Amino acid sequence: MTSGGVAWPRSAGPLELRPPTSADLDGVLAWRNRPEVTRWLLRTTVDPEAFRRAWLDSVADPEQQAVVAVLDGLVIGTGSLEIRDGMGQFDGDAWRRAEGLLGYLVDPAHAGNGHATRIAGALLDVAFIELGLHRVTAGCFADNVASWRVMEKLGMRREQHGVQDSWHAELGWVDGYTYGILADEWAPTSATASVPVPGSS
């Protein structure tokens, strides 16, 4: 199938990335609301029905590339790329749909195996190679070492250290990081490249 002009499913190492189905989201919800996951998210516990509806609605939204990551038939992660207008003067059209906001999440039972890097790398491929975006950003709590290491592994630079810019339900005000990368800086490797599955369209 295609979503916003991008062909899915596609492989990213051992993972298959594809737009979510309702059954896929049941798999995500089995681990999404666990404390070890929600501690790192701006939106902590989610209502299952609202969560499912938002992800399924994203499949038909040309400004969203939202996928689940499947390993041996099991949904072990999610990824998202939200397409946005760039910031700046409004002369011309170069700023329209020029930027992406990247997100990724992995089931804690499958963390530490490079899956977040594969998901994020595949979405950067989509952003720069297929959608022609100018720039992609992503953010995390400063204490989320695993997340910012993924971004740095992919060549993203730390562009902002926001001091106590993020409210955390358990910790109060905490620091946050913002990372960014430009199209001409993206250099996919064999570990991050994604390949459309033959026959998908």
Image (cartoon, helix red, strand yellow):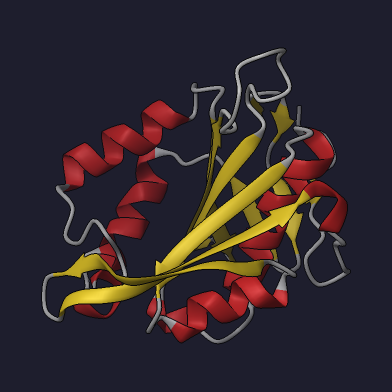
**Horizontally, is 177 left or right of 87 in the view?**
left
**Horizontally, is 156 left or right of 24 in the view?**
right
User: What residue appears at the point 67 percent right and 13 percent down from the top-left corner?
Assistant: 91
On screen, residue 101 above or below 74: above
| Picture quadrant of residue 151 | bottom right
User: What residue appears at the point 67 percent right and 31 percent down from the top-left corner?
Assistant: 98
- Decide which of 36, 147 is in the foreground and name it: 147
If the image is split into quadrants, where does the C terminus sit?
top right
- Residue at the farthest top position: 92
**Horizontally, is 155 left or right of 48 in the view?**
right
| Picture quadrant of residue 130 | top right
On screen, residue 84 above or below 179: above
Q: Residue 3: where, in percent of width, then height? A: 62, 27
Q: Is residue 90 visible?
A: yes
User: What residue appears at the point 41 percent right and 49 percent down from the top-left corner?
Assistant: 24
- Decide which of 114, 87 is in the foreground and name it: 87
